[in-house]
Image (tube, rainbow, N blue to C red):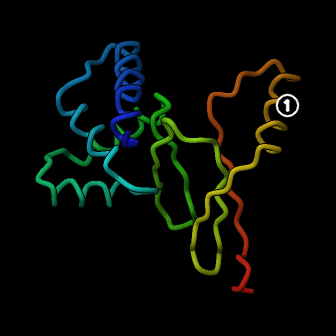
């Protein structure tokens, strides 16, 4: 089963619940935007998404796009990161494992890595503090091997 088919229904549910809680409606436009976001691969900026939507003849205002992206982050559908390029990047987090971004300051390359040890350490810390983690974002800036 393709990623979109598998996780888009869960994302719709999260978004619908978030909107209801905030006394908003899951409109046709919001559904269309969510569908389009699930077509994206990897990280994307709002401007890149807007450009792709215009190419695909999908109509949405810049204000609506930014507001919807922010809502989807709050709903736990998207993660946001600043890789030092001067704008926010988004990625779908529904159905993905937590990861850390390694950002090379020389090339701008971004690598995603997973660490069971780090996840365990964060879980232990949260448990000791009586805290429930909903999401986290860790970005490490440095220089990749071969670019030193």
Callout 1 secondary element: helix
The quadrant of the picture occupied by the N terminus is top left
Residue at figure coordinates x 71%, y 85% from the top left: 146
Q: Position of residue 69 (x, y in %)?
A: 38, 40
Q: Position of residue 138 (x, y in %)?
A: 69, 50
Residue 133 occupies quadrant? top right
Q: Position of residue 37 (x, y in %)?
A: 32, 45
Residue at figure coordinates x 70%, y 76% from the top left: 144
Compared to 47, does 8 lie above or below?
A: above
Q: Nearer the viewer, residue 64 or 123?
A: 123
- Extreme front residue here? 1
Q: Position of residue 24 (x, y in %)?
A: 29, 18
Q: Nearer the viewer, residue 5 or 29?
A: 5
Residue under numbered circle 1: 125
Residue at figure coordinates x 31%, y 49% from the top left: 39
Report the side of 83 relative to 11 (left or right): right
The quadrant of the picture occupied by the C terminus is bottom right
Q: Nearer the viewer, residue 113 or 81?
A: 113
């Amino acid at each position: 089963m393709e990623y979109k088919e598998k996780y888009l229904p869960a994302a719709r549910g999260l978004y619908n619940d978030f909107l209801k809680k905030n006394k908003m409606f899951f409109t046709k436009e919001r559904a269309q935007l969510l569908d389009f976001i699930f077509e994206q691969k990897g990280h994307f900026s709002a401007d890149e998404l807007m450009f792709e939507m215009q190419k695909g003849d999908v109509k949405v205002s810049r204000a609506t796009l930014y507001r919807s992206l922010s809502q989807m982050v709050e709903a736990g559908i998207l993660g946001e990161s600043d890789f030092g390029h001067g704008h926010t990047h988004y990625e779908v987090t529904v159905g993905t494992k937590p990861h850390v971004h390694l950002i090379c300051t020389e090339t701008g390359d971004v690598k995603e890595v997973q660490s069971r040890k780090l996840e365990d350490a964060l879980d232990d810390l949260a448990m000791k503090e009586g805290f429930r983690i909903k999401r986290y974002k860790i970005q490490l800036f440095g220089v990749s091997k071969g670019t030193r």
